[in-house]
Amino acid sequence: MKILKLLFSLALVLHVSCTGGSAFTNENISNITVDEAYRLISEKAGRADFVILDIRTPGEYLSGHIEGAVNIDYSSPAFKDDLKKLDRSLEYLVYCRSGNRSARAMPVFSELGFKKVYNMTGGTVEWFSSGKKLVK
């Protein structure tokens, strides 16, 4: 029984670290599912105060992204400087390929004082596998 508890604890730690989870919390940042993100996009489509932000590499972005998304590369040394140029009073839906990079980026958004940021867990992998479209 002790071995099972130890394995369960180890699996939980690995799951949290592999999915980008952390103890980081902030009232301005929300983790949302792909379905919740889809509903959010549907509700706020075309609004100037809502931005979809793809933080994958430019190559990943060009291979297919959520319609209307703007690309800022998380792996770029200029990532934080690029975020500083954005209007922090707007609402942002942020995603990457699997949700790992976007989860790791949330403390940066918080540090910079963004008003409202939604982190789409599961990224484009889950988006596409749930039957939603990506555009090129």
Image (tube, helix red, strand yellow):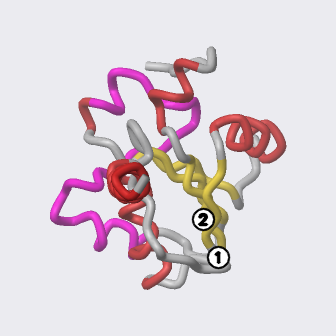
- Tell me, yes or no, whether the highlighted magenta stretch contains residue 67: yes
Q: Is residue 56 left or right of residue 112?
A: left
Q: Is residue 50 left or right of residue 11?
A: right
Q: Position of residue 105 (x, y in %)?
A: 38, 64
The structure residue drawn at horizontal position 41% and vertical position 43%, both measured from the top left corner, is 96
- Going by the numbered disc 2, the residue's amino acid type is Val
Q: How many numbered discs?
A: 2
- Report which quarter residue 35 is drawn in: top right
Q: Position of residue 59 (x, y in %)?
A: 24, 30
Q: Position of residue 1 (x, y in %)?
A: 43, 52
Q: Nearer the viewer, residue 108 or 51?
A: 108
The structure residue drawn at horizontal position 66% and vertical position 63%, both measured from the top left corner, is 91
- Residue tagged by mark 2? 117
Establish if 9 lies above or below 107: above
**What is the crowding at mark 2: few (fewer than 14 residues within 10 Å), some, or many (at least 20)?**
many
Q: Nearer the viewer, residue 69 or 96?
A: 96
- Distance from Cα at disc 1 to Cα at disc 2: 6 Å
- Going by the numbered disc 1, the residue's amino acid type is Asn
- Residue tagged by mark 1? 28
**What are the residue bounds of the magenta stretch?**
60-85
